[in-house]
Amino acid sequence: MSHSNTLLVIEDDPGLQKQLKWSLDQYDIVLASNRTEAIAALRRFTPSVVTLDLGLPPDPTNASEGIATLKEILALAPHTKIIVVTGNDDRSNAIEAVALGAYDFYQKPIDPDTLNLIISRAFHLEALEQDYRTLQQQQTFSTGLIATSPQMLTVMRMVERIAPTHSTVLLLGESGTGKEVLAKTIHRQSQRNQQPFVAVNCAAIPETLLESELFGYEKGAFTGAVVQTKGKIEYAQGGTFFLDEIGDLPFALQAKLLRFIQERVIERLGGRKEIPVDVRIICATHCNLQNLIAQNLFRSDLYYRLSEITLEIPPLRDREGDILAIGNALLQRYCKEHNCKEKRFSREAAHAIENYAWPGNIRELENKLKRAVILSDNTLITTEDLEISDQLDNSMPLNLKAVRDAAEVTAIKRALHFTDCNITEASRLLGITRPTLYSLLEKHGIQDMIRNHLAQE
Ligand SMILES: Nc1ncnc2c1ncn2[C@@H]1O[C@H](COP(=O)(O)OP(=O)(O)OP(=O)(O)O)[C@@H](O)[C@H]1O
Ligand SMILES: [Mg+2]
């Protein structure tokens, strides 16, 4: 994980500013001489560590402006490590600052070595805490499913709630999004987890065989039925029955499945006995079932039975932070499996992975990483090893760029509303320079907003 090296120094005395800048040159130093500048710099550079002189203008003999700055920083960026710097005789304010959440305090006159030590410890601690926060957010389930994004954590909270129930679950998601692992996760978290999990893929079995595969047959039911054979549904007795690619279930069989769901009994082909089966049913499809219903290819009564609870699994590209979390975990797994030294992504590769649209979702990520691990001799996996640089150009810009542009416009408009179209204030709020804001206004064609505003005045 990469950590920032940015140190914000809030100090109004130009002489001290110079001295600090010189003695702390191993950090990327940003200077601010008052509260307004400090908050602007905080928004713009998101420093991990801040040194804050408590005596700030307008009245450097009074610590109130310093304390107010401290509170504002902690409210905006609570993880920031703030080291307050106080005058020699100002111990009580220093203690108050620490009580309010400052990381440490330091009394003038400044001794560069000591201050350096405190700052480097603060950076170290912040890096550890940041790693810990990331790890804490990341969850790996017993089925190997990894989730860190808010989108997937929401899905996983749903899973936690529905797993212990008997409800039929319909999983919807693009191909490779993890429908099957999610079905297994639901099974593992249910009270049925000691009983079988049986999966049938409707798309993988020829229509003529699917019925006997699902329901089984008696001896002599058809030519070749030499022994009595149980169906997959019966094999799942007491456990979970996972019917994958339900959109491919032939129309004729849909009625039979519906009957099973309603009555919870099956009849083997050629048999007359009704056999009660207690299974939890989970279905999955990448198809749009509503469209199939509209085309009379899927029974709506079956759909309503199956979709007691519907879980939509977001595509990988919509899961913030998941792509690299899953990518890194898989990379380590494959390196172990191939007995090769640990590898990691080059910076460009990590960037490309995050920006690629992953139409085949996690399955595609798996394939690309397996290939890269086998073919690359280096510790660093490059963009070329992953073969995604080309697709990047024709698959991504339309989507992600549009998303980013829209987000940018929203944030800019909000900042302008907030500041009554004051460009200086708005650029501070956004953490960018005025020229940058002007060029963004032009880029997005929203200069009119300001003109109209001025015209109204
Ligand atoms: N969140 C995840 N973390 C780690 N691995 C995952 C995750 N989701 C899916 N996978 C892996 O990705 C692969 C595809 O998952 P799965 O087969 O469950 O997807 P699917 O939606 O059923 O795909 P398909 O439409 O291709 O059948 C599997 O090898 C699975 O283990
Ligand atoms: Mg599947």
Image (cartoon, rainbow, N blue to C red):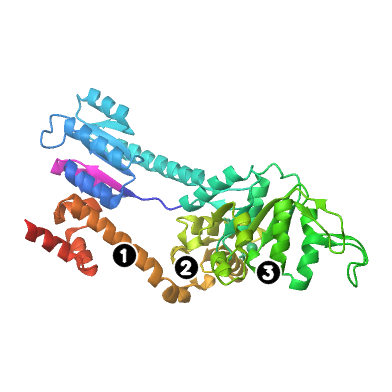
**Residue 396 drawn at (x, y percent):** 42, 71
Of the residues shown, which amino acid type is indicated by label 3?
A: Phe
Cβ–Cβ under 8 Å for marks 3 and 1: no
Q: Earlier in the sequence, mark 3 or mark 2?
A: 3
Q: Is residue 12 magenta?
A: yes
Horizontal side of residue 405 vs 264, given as left or right: left
Q: Is residue 450 magenta?
A: no
Quadrant hosting ligand 2: bottom right
Horizontal side of residue 355 vs 105, given as left or right: right
> Quick one: label 2, few (<14), some, or many (20+) residues within 10 Å?
many
Q: Does the image show residue 201?
A: no
Q: Is residue 437 above or below residue 197?
A: below
Viewer-nearest residue: 384 or 300: 300
Q: Which residue is mark 1?
A: 405
Q: Which residue is mark 2?
A: 357
Which residue lies at the image location 18% right of the left edge and 46% below the top edge?
37
Of the residues shown, which amino acid type is indicated by label 1?
A: Asp
Ligand 1 within 8 angstroms of badge 1 C-beta: no
Q: Earlier in the sequence, mark 1 or mark 2?
A: 2
**Residue 61 drawn at (x, y percent):** 12, 29
Magenta segment range? 7-23
Of the residues shown, which amino acid type is indicated by label 2?
A: Ala
Q: Which residue is mark 3?
A: 251
Element type at mark 1: helix
**Residue 349 drawn at (x, y percent):** 47, 66
Element type at mark 3: helix
